[in-house]
Image (cartoon, rainbow, N blue to C red):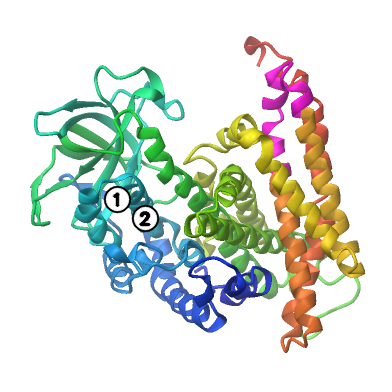
């Protein structure tokens, strides 16, 4: 039976030692002192450990069942969902006008990590609702907000996003779902959507679907797409539920992982829909939801790595196998625990250094979102836009890799269901695929995001790294172990960007063939920046007489490992990028 231990102490380090949240000039952050965040994280950690985690295996083994048009969730899910709902956890950062608590998105992110590590499939139900609320809050009319948000934020109703159809995924311009205008201002929605997470289930009274569809006579392609609110049950003027809408779940996907989440085929047969936002501007509204979802998926990726690492560590500390090559460590036992062996240490350090760096990277990204939204800082919003494909693509690739490393730590035991590691591997795999495959993320980064604002945002990132290095270069210990490796990685990233500028215009494939490596190069550089910042924070804590010296010494040792063993891979990514398109495109399609 796998375990989960909420990493609240490490989260507090990132929030207060590295980010210094209560000192930031962001509205609402002045309330985020250590006592306040400790109380929230402590309670969320209890729910994650005591309520959600025990249901993770149950959800995986039982899955969801479609019975007479109703999706039955696994045993215990409804009761757990009710506990989460009663605790107000679904509206942590939601607008108080509609029943939310109005806390910063950063707090929601920290809680979301624990919930996702404990039970990713379960947490997806409220995660999809959170994203749908964001889209309605930004793009909906006042009446739509009043009609839907209070019940969605409270958890009485759920929410989904409906994009994909059988004939198209990424290329949404090919969708066929139609929206026929009606005399009363509504639309009749007809079509089929697939892979709709939480599309139908028994834990809420209503499901509010956000559906992409085309109004006849509109522009071709994505320019003709509109977004519609299509509730499972129509809502009466007094807010009560009316008749069932003309939509249904036509089936459940049989998946590799996240069995506890209902992944539905949704059929719309002239269902009543309500236009949200402007006609033919549906992609703009949907991207509000998709960008939040991509950040949520980035979190899922490293969160699965985090729980997998915890279980790998526990196994390595207990499993007896062989003797330490430098001398017996447990003479009273028939063998030493495998954690004494250097290769097992390497494996565990790869996991630990990634998870802790990824947590800092994600929390920093969440703080930029707060800075953009709460301070109306357009530069912060631009930075988030640039970093979103990096966060989603890099953290899910490496998060999945981390679950595999954790599974490897257990050897044969990791391949069995009894220990739970294989479920973490299966569940993490989807994060590299949904909300835009990671290949698409890399194309978005290189093809669109690098050039945004005339390249000013990426230059701002480089200046941020340069300024941090210059500000701290007088600290010799930080310089040698953290700043010098960070400078080398940043130089590799800038050189790769210059290669694209010099060669991409001549042949776009030179940029596209290197886009995936560039995404990872960018991700590694961000992780280097995070570890440099955490290294500085740990040194300052030690210099200030911190009582828990072991915690900060461990943080420094972990950071040094990442900078010495992981960050140098930026040179490899640069070499691949500079090889251009020729090695990638050399074969004719028929010769593969």
- Tell me, for residue 514, which label it has, or none: none
Residue 232: tell me if it is visible: yes
Residue plotted at (74% across, 21% down): 581
In the image, 46 versus 446, the foreground residue is 446
Q: Earlier in the sequence, mark 2 or mark 1?
A: 2
Question: Position of 97 compared to 514: left or right?
Answer: left
Mark 1 = which residue? Answer: 159
| Contact between labelled residues 1 and 2, with CB atoms less than 8 Å apart | yes
Percent across and percent down for residue 380 are: 58, 52
Helix, strand or loop status at disc 2: helix
Q: Is residue 331 above or below residue 88?
A: below
Q: Is residue 444 above or below residue 400?
A: above
Q: Is residue 499 above or below residue 42?
A: above
Q: CA distance from mark 2 to mark 1?
A: 8 Å
In magenta, the rendered stretch is 500-521
Considering the whole magenta stretch, tell me its main secondary structure: helix
Mark 2 = which residue? Answer: 130
């Amino acid at each position: 039976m796998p375990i989960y231990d909420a990493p609240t102490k490490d989260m507090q380090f990132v929030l207060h030692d590295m980010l210094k949240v209560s000192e930031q000039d962001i509205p609402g952050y002045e309330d985020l002192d250590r006592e306040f965040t400790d109380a929230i994280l402590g309670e969320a950690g209890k729910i994650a450990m005591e309520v959600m985690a025990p249901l993770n295996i149950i959800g995986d083994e039982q899955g969801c069942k479609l019975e007479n048009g109703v999706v039955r969730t696994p045993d215990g899910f409804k009761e757990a969902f009710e506990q989460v709902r009663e605790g107000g956890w679904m509206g942590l950062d939601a607008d108080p006008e509609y029943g939310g608590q109005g806390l910063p998105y950063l707090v929601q992110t920290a809680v979301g990590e624990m919930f996702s590590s404990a039970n990713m499939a379960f947490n997806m139900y409220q995660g999809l609702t959170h994203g749908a609320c964001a889209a309605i809050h930004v793009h909906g009319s006042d009446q739509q907000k009043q009609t839907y948000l209070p019940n969605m934020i409270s958890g009485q109703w759920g929410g989904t996003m409906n994009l994909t159809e059988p004939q198209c995924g990424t290329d949404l311009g090919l969708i066929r779902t139609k929206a026929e205008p009606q005399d009363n201002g509504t639309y009749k929605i007809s079509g089929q959507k697939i892979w709709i997470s939480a599309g139908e289930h028994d834990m809420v009274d209503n499901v509010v679907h956000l559906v992409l569809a085309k109004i006849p006579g509109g522009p071709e392609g994505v320019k003709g797409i509109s977004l519609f609110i299509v509730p499972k049950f129509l809502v009466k003027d007094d807010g009560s539920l009316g008749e069932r809408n003309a939509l249904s779940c036509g089936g459940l996907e049989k998946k590799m992982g996240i069995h506890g989440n209902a992944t539905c085929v949704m059929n719309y047969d002239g269902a009543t829909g309500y236009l949200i936002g402007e006609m033919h501007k549906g992609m703009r509204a949907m991207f509000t939801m998709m960008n939040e979802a991509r950040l949520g998926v980035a979190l899922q990726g490293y969160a699965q790595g985090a729980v997998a690492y915890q279980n790998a560590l526990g196994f390595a500390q207990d499993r007896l196998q062989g003797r330490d090559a430098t001398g017996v460590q447990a003479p009273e036992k028939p063998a030493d625990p495998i954690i004494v062996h250097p290769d097992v240490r390497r494996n565990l350090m790869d996991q630990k250094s990634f998870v802790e760096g990824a947590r800092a990277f994600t929390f920093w990204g969440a703080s930029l979102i707060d800075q953009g939204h709460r301070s109306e800082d357009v530069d912060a919003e631009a930075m988030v836009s640039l970093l979103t494909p990096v966060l989603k693509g890099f953290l899910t690739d490496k998060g999945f890799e981390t679950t595999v490393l954790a599974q490897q730590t257990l050897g044969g035991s990791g391949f069995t269901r009894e220990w739970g590691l294989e479920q973490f591997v299966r569940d993490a795999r989807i994060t590299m695929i949904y909300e835009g495959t990671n290949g698409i993320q890399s194309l978005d980064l290189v093809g669109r995001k690098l050039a945004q604002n005339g390249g000013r945002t990426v230059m701002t990132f480089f200046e941020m790294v340069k300024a941090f290095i210059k500000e701290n270069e007088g600290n010799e210990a930080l310089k040698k172990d953290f700043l010098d490796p960070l400078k080398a990685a940043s130089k590799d990233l800038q050189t790769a960007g210059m290669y694209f500028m010099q060669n991409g215009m001549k042949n776009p494939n030179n940029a596209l063939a290197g886009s995936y490596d560039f995404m990872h190069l960018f991700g590694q550089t961000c992780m280097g920046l995070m570890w440099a910042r955490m290294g500085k924070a740990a040194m300052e804590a030690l210099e200030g007489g911190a009582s828990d010296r072991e915690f900060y010494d461990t943080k420094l040792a972990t950071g040094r490992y990442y900078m010495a063993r992981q960050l140098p891979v930026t040179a490899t990514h640069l070499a691949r990028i500079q090889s251009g398109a020729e090695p990638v495109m050399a074969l004719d399609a028929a010769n593969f």
